[in-house]
Amino acid sequence: MPLYLNDDQKMLQDSAADFMKGEGNVAHFREFRDKNCKDGFSHALWKQFAEMGFTGILVSEDEGGLGLGHVEAGVVLEEVGRNLTPSPFLTTAVAGVEALNAGGKALREKYLPGILSGDSVLALAIDEGPKHRPDQIAMAATREGNGFKLDGKKQFVVQGGSADTLIVAARTSGSAGEDKGLTLFAVDTSSNGLARDSVRLVDSAVAAHVAFEGVVVDADAVIGEVDEGGAVLQRMLNAGRAGSAAETLGVGAGAMDITVEYIKGRKQFDTIIGSFQALQHRTAHLYSEMEIARATVLKAQQMLDERSSKAEMMVSVAKAKAGKATALSVREGVQMHGGVGMTDEYDIGLYMKRDRALSEFMGDANYHTNLVAQMHGY
Amino acid sequence: MSDLESFRAETAAWLEANCPPEMRQPAVDESDICWGGKNPTFKPGQKEWMDKMAAKGWTVPDWPTEYGGGGLSRAETKILLQEMGRLKIRSPLSSFGIWMLGPALLHFGTEEQKLHFLPPIARGEVRWCQGYSEPGSGSDLASLQTSAEDKGDHYLINGQKIWTSYADKADWIFCLTRTDKSSKHKGISFMLFDMTNKGVETKPIVLISGQSAFCETFFADVEVPKSYGDGVSSVVGEVNRGWDVAKYLLGHERSMISGDGSSGATSLGSKFADQYGRDEMGRLDDPMLRAQMADMDIDVLAFRAMAERFGDTFKANLCHPAQPNMMKYAGTEINKRRHELIMSAGGSEVLEWESDASNGGLTARGWLRTKANSIEGGTSEVMLNVVSKQILQLPNA
């Protein structure tokens, strides 16, 4: 498969780009930020995501979706990133759906209709500390009657406040650091004993601290098999990481475009500042980094779609490379804008804040660089 | 099984059955590269492998069969290279004829020139060198002065080239000459001639690596015929329009040099962890070096994806014409960093310059060689200029 988008994927890209630019653009983002919306996104826009078919990209055709893959999910996410579109797309329709795809049919029949119609929001309860360490998950799920009782705390549950369902990773046996013993659950946020404290983040997205105190769930809330949730979690992480790499790429590309346009117009010393070699070389270097990141993200998505055994490595490479390239893009962007780069009026700072939050989602560049070293056996 | 799957299976079987065992060992130094030519030095297995591959057209798999190529599609060529990589099989033939002159002739050459010059390149019979840079014309290549005076049935060449790779070992040269002094860019011609001509002299240049891959090449009243018979002109493209050919070829050269030097190589970290020692978790036990190696793994794997995407989009005419400049910049900078890391990992042992243990200072000489990567074929700074002007459309000062 050649490493560029095919005609169908390009058509999807065009319609996703038109949609985000028209309906989910930066002005829309500012509107929801400024009215201090408790969910941080528009439910009406989320319904439109569904009408466009985006929420069914990773859902099989038999189950009412489009039966497409990670490349297509990434196409949409890149436009989400480029336009700073606030939506629960990544957690619900990409990572969430992929977790459900790893589980049984009954769970999909329960949750997919709401996702396909844009009525439902899923959030992921994985992290228990300030950094993403899925191998250190300690939250307990103990057997009780026909089901399980969940006790513990999760944080950085993005869209956790507005979600109706959480995908929760907890320990049914073993202890932190062990592969076996993890189990994934689909938990309704209205469950007794489940408390959510929503906090606004630097990028104006909303995430929740979630406390579980004796939250009882049925056995049929288990996604996949008890104690074998590691594989389900990995599949969900692969989708979420590749997806967030694609969104990050969109953030970086958007920031780069804004910056290049800015330095083509700004004059100092009676000269367009974009004609200075000091800026030209840095911008060209940035372009090179962004191009490499783009190839890497697409490669990881293709490998996931081909179910390659090496996909996990490439997903980590993509998350790290897209993260580093985009971090460069937003930092250079603010610097090259000069003073106005520090103002709320200009958009470039919004991109910097979005990148900061996305980089922490499912592991930053350092985390994934370390994983790549481990996968290489050193 | 699809056509491509069966092509893969057949190719793998043929390679396994025909590749000499010597050619499945990793290349250690320069002598492990097969250059062919009229005065070749072959190591065991090299000639056999070159001839076998040439007979199938696979020294130049994507050239048309009538010019000695394999006539393979982009997808088939990729599969052949993948299978050679998987089986750790070395390239059968390396040459500037394959990398540079071939693409120029395929694009700009007449049918007579293609039939005359290409098959001997594919068979490894003629070794070519490239006469571009001059002492006063480096980054500003189009200012070149080597003159070719029209003498009716021949040109008279006078001047000097520099950084002519392997000019002392080459049989023929493709050379940029000035045929009109009144126009900078429209006064250059792309000429082909025999290095055994009277008046051609080469002098190897000793580099910081102690090696002499490059030469100074002098031309004193060298007579180059206008025709080699049967309508085969010695000039590629039109006279005075050689800059078009040169620019096209610089694109090729830049994509070629852009290789990060690690194709098929395993991760540096896993290689050096055994040598360095590991901590109780199995990690390379110098944490700072480990972090740098891991960063390098990310960049190498990412650039490999970029190279694949560049190749795919280039063939499909989907990439920006200035994209090779970006590739050259990125690939050479990664390769230089990679060799800094190799030196750092090797410590004092790779400082040895002549010992048997160091294989004659192989690592150190290789490190020094990479410093030329971001200079030859256009410096990194020139690449960034081109990207900022042609791709990002930033204005001139």
Image (cartoon, coloured by chain):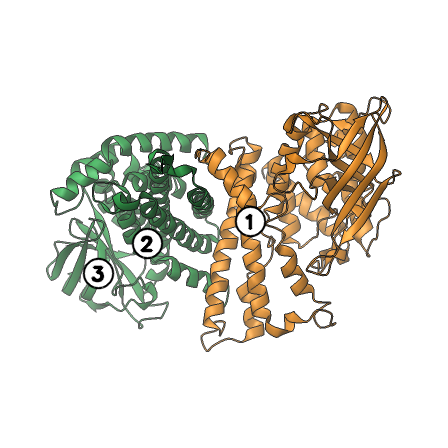
Chain colours: A green, B orange
The amino acid pointed to by label 1 is Gly
Residue at numbered disc 2: A359
Distance (Cα) linking label 2 and label 3: 16 Å
Q: Chain of mark 1?
A: B
Residue B17: % across, % down: 75, 50
Q: Chain of mark 3?
A: A
Residue B100: % across, % down: 69, 38
- Circle count: 3
Residue B140 appears left or right of B217: left
Q: To which quarter of the image does residue B220 belong?
A: top right
Viewer-proximal residue, A131 or B213? Answer: B213
* Disc nearest the viewer among 1 and 2: 1
- Determine whether A273 is above or below A233 in the image: above
Res A155 label: 3
Q: How would you rate the neighbour count of disc 1 (Cα within 10 Å): few for under 14, some for 14-19, many for 20 or more?
A: many
Residue A176 appears left or right of B5: left
Residue B382 appears left or right of A320: right
The amino acid pointed to by label 3 is Gln
Residue B70 at least partly seen: no
Q: What kind of element bears circle 2?
A: helix
Res B331 label: 1
Viewer-proximal residue, A179 or A367? Answer: A367
Q: Residue at x 37, y 67 (%)?
A: A179
Q: To which quarter of the image does residue A189 belong?
A: bottom left
Distance (Cα) linking label 3 and label 1: 40 Å
Res B165 label: none
